[in-house]
Image (spheres, coloured by chain):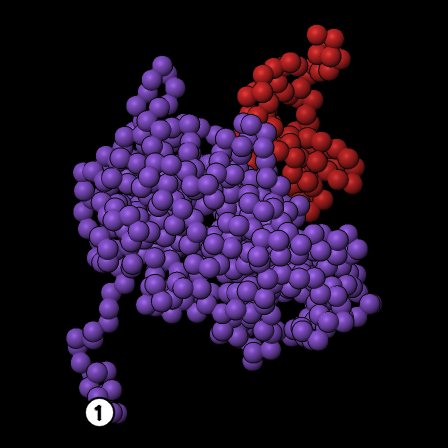
Amino acid sequence: MPFGLLKFGLSKGHPVPRALPAASELRDSYDVVIIGGGGHGLATAYYLARDWGITNVAVLEKGYVGGGNTGRNTTIIRSNYLTPEGVKFYDESVTLYKDLANDFDMNIMYSERGHFTLAHTDSAIRTMRWRAEVNKHMGIESELVMRDELQRMVPQLNYSEDVRYPIMGALYHAPGAIARHDAVAWGYGAGAARRGATIHQKTEVTGLEITKANGSPRRVTGVHTNRGTIRAGKVIQCVAGMSGEVARMAGFKLPIKTIPLQACVSQPLKPFLDAIVVSGSLHVYVSQSSRGELVMGGSTDPYGVYMTRSTLDFKEGLMMHMMELLPFIGEVKLLRQWAGMTDMTPDFAPIMGETPVDDYYIDAGWGTWGFKATPVVGKRNAEMLATGKVPDLIKPFALQRFHDFTLLGEKGAASVGH
Amino acid sequence: MKIMTCPLNGPRNISEFAYGGEVKELPAPGCDNETWVDYVYLQENLAGVVKEWWYHTPTAFWFIAERDTRTDTILKTYAASEVFKERVDFAAGDKE
């Protein structure tokens, strides 16, 4: 066997499978053009091909596959939201995630850890109880655990009373998981390409061709890119962070503010933290990756920029709270720091479905909750594009809700400030 | 630390300030719902030079800042009175 390995190592023709096919020329026309080659866009292409047999599809990505916010999140997957609309939606996502590695025949390193949202005040305990009851009613494993029980389940945390925000209890969500975000993008991309969809990297959309009627935008017919113009039957934008700029090309405004969300990882440590720990009051979430790094994130930045820079203010604020939660990590060094650009909506819920322009669909407003929704978004986007009808599951997330004053109020969204 | 120049207090750490939204024209009293939707929810959210309300928290002072959201640089700050010279008569709308 060692000889076989040596032979393999020395041979020139390594049979390393190529995940994505080499770059190809743009065709003149596609049935569906997906703007954005992140998790959501690629998942949409994947389910269009797999479930609906629609393969004359182009995914346009201005950078490289999964190089945007898909690769910048902290990879937490859960469904213990607050509104019934949110719970139902994310539950389908968690169900799909569990089978994804088999679907792809690729290890996405899906790891169920148990997700604990800490409560530090009486009012937080009340909200956790409310969330737990909504979750249980919808068939989700979710319960409130008080301090003593929590201490047995997650003994690593600091349960001292002598801190700014002592821990009183937590919302425990057993199916809470983490996964490798790059693998999710690659798996969807490779799966879509294998079934016939084309993925064009380094292809930036510069404008949209829209037929006008009575001066107001009507129907999308084509897409201008830095590699030429293509005709399109249907177009969907899946461009977290740049949603407002792309929607502007289509001629309408969104209720979205682009705000960076920063995160960082520590040097690798021996495995000591199995659980995913989140605290809304401390604006902290932390989990230990399978490489041993502590993956840490905090609240969104105090103001919006179109940048992925990291700031000292953020790290000072985050580490102050981390030290309260896990005092023994004081000597641990940071390894990497980054930021993602989040689409923040006024009600912390996404925007999906139809737009004022015919045949132009939107998948935006994914704030700090987009990664965990990747499979369900892809599946339902595909259904919408294939049938031309908005699936019931995503109807509550329509852009129209802001015009009808029927906002959702999803307060179960991450540990962002609200 | 990032420094912002407050028109009232001079250069201060940006952590002393709070962002207050885009500068928009206040709809006329009694306007239709769509105008309110535009005013309350919809955002220009421009990648470029924007004009926004900012607030110096310790001194409770509102002012206007122009900054570039692509580079995170503050171009200029000035008192709101330079733009809004007339007082809005809110009571006028109620009477209609």
Q: Name the residue located 48 percent from the left edge and 30 percent from the top edge.
A: A253
Q: Which residue is situated farthest in the bottom direction here? A: A2
Q: Position of residue A311 (x, y in %)?
A: 59, 54
| Residue B48 or residue A160, whichever sits in front | A160
Left or right: where A413 falls relative to B86: left
Label the purple chain with its letter: A
Q: Colour of chain B?
A: red
Which of the image's four quarters has the C terminus of chain A? top right
Residue A62: x, y in percent? 34, 47
Residue sitting at 64 percent across and 47 percent down?
A411
- Residue A248 percent coordinates (x, y): 42, 31
Q: Where is residue B47 shown, x and y percent of the image?
A: 47, 37
Residue A154 to residue A366: above or below:
below
Residue at (52, 69) in percent of width and height: A112
The number of discs equals: 1
Relative height, residue B48 to residue A63 (above, below): above
Q: Which residue is the site of mark 1? A: A3
